[in-house]
Image (spheres, coloured by chain):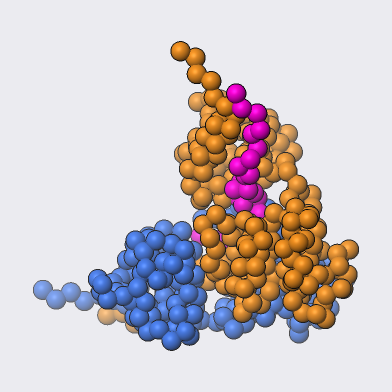
Chain colours: A orange, B blue
Amino acid sequence: MRRVYSSDFLCNEVTKLLMDVPEVVVNRLPQYVRALRQILEDGSEIVSSQLLGQTLQMTPAQIRKDLSYFGRFGKQGRGYNVRYLVTELQDILQLDHEWNIAVVGVGRLGRAIISYPGFSPEGFKVIAAFDSDSRQVGQSIGGLIVQPMDELADTVRQKGIQIGIVAVPAAQASDVVERITSCGIRAILNYAPVNPLVPPEVKVRNIDPVLSLQSMTYYLRSGDTGSTSN
Amino acid sequence: MRRVYSSDFLCNEVTKLLMDVPEVVVNRLPQYVRALRQILEDGSEIVSSQLLGQTLQMTPAQIRKDLSYFGRFGKQGRGYNVRYLVTELQDILQLDHEWNIAVVGVGRLGRAIISYPGFSPEGFKVIAAFDSDSRQVGQSIGGLIVQPMDELADTVRQKGIQIGIVAVPAAQASDVVERITSCGIRAILNYAPVNPLVPPEVKVRNIDPVLSLQSMTYYLRSGDTGSTSN
């Protein structure tokens, strides 16, 4: 018996499969892409999981396991075809798309984000800026006119904004995150030093240098603290 | 028989035990501390793993497991004593210390880092700034005089610098990381969009907004892509 599947059905099945990938694995994929692009630039077409592991400071077994979620990319003992793997991973992560971003908060941090040259080459376009401070509204920053918060929902819809960047002080962050998600945005990059609560369908990545520093001081134990012995 | 242990011995044993904690657990502890401080500020002295889980968007089981690496902090069904737990975790992470930081690279990003008001209240003191560009050397930024790179080793030793922040372009990052680690620094916060190779005793945390964005676009699949069905 030959079965026929509708494209809707297949699309849903693929989506379900992709959703089963642990988030920690998904979070590593961008690093794979960057390492593979570098390897390609350096002139290699084939890479072993050993070499990729060295570059990423991971074990080859971990790399093989991570990639196995997405299909068979390499043959045992033959290594990975770099060009193919990077294309597939870019496709999985949807890096070939252009993504429209709104920045909320145009203080020193927000301004630095709007002017950051690293986003655009990767397809991340900051196309709107908002602030609740009426003294900021109307100002031009990096070619964008700062808009008042009550224009957020309309602008998100009209301009097809899919990602929000939060660059407001901690005290305002939860409110801003709620306003952003109520506009239907499902991806938030949060620079405020808080852990905002969001509905399960919304992804948040927090950028917080203090938390990063605090996770390293744990390891800064000097071996020479005890001076008495008996 | 009564055994007597030297403090050196005990210190080494404690260090060994602490080193066995998975790094992913250590990385979560600063978030626990922040959440617990907030709970304390809000006036609660006792917190359940359920409530803590809601705040951190983790399961209660995960929280209990994470904390169990460090001893018994709560009684079954009684919840955690917030004040005690936060003090213990701060102690484990050595957050009561002051940490001296050198920033390398004083472009737009480096200047923003030096002026960032969030470090100092948490005990992270940026006390030196370096740049390889002679036009930057000698300038005053946030009260620091930018020093040339060849003063790095001496300054690290003289001023007791334990943490390096890398804010140079990608092309220079590996060299800078190598110079920093060769001065004996074992904790690096890296803002350059590369994954630097370091010896196993050195910890690196990368801050890279592009990687964070790229790990979210994976989830931005619209359910309405397929339009043909048969």
Q: Nearer the viewer, residue B86 or A49?
A: B86
**Picture residue at 48% right of the left edge, 43% below the top:** A20
Q: In this view, does B120 lie to the left or right of A152?
A: left
**Picture residue at 76% right of the left edge, 82% below the top:** B142
Q: What stretch is highlighted in magenta?
A: B201-230
Residue B9 visible at all: no
Q: Is residue A163 left or right of residue B40?
A: right
Which residue occupies the extreme front position in the image?
Answer: B230
**Picture residue at 69% right of the left edge, 70% below the top:** A167
Which residue occupies the extreme top position in the image?
Answer: A1
- Residue B67 is situated, as x and y percent measured from the top left of the image, at 36, 67
Q: In this view, does B14 lie above or below B225?
A: below
Decide whether residue B203 is among the magenta residues: yes
- Residue B220 is situated, as x and y percent measured from the top left of the image, at 63, 48
- Residue A177 is situated, as x and y percent measured from the top left of the image, at 62, 67
Q: In this view, does A14 lie above or below A3?
A: below
Q: Which of B227 and A77 is in front in this view?
A: B227
| Quadrant into which the C terminus of chain A falls | bottom left
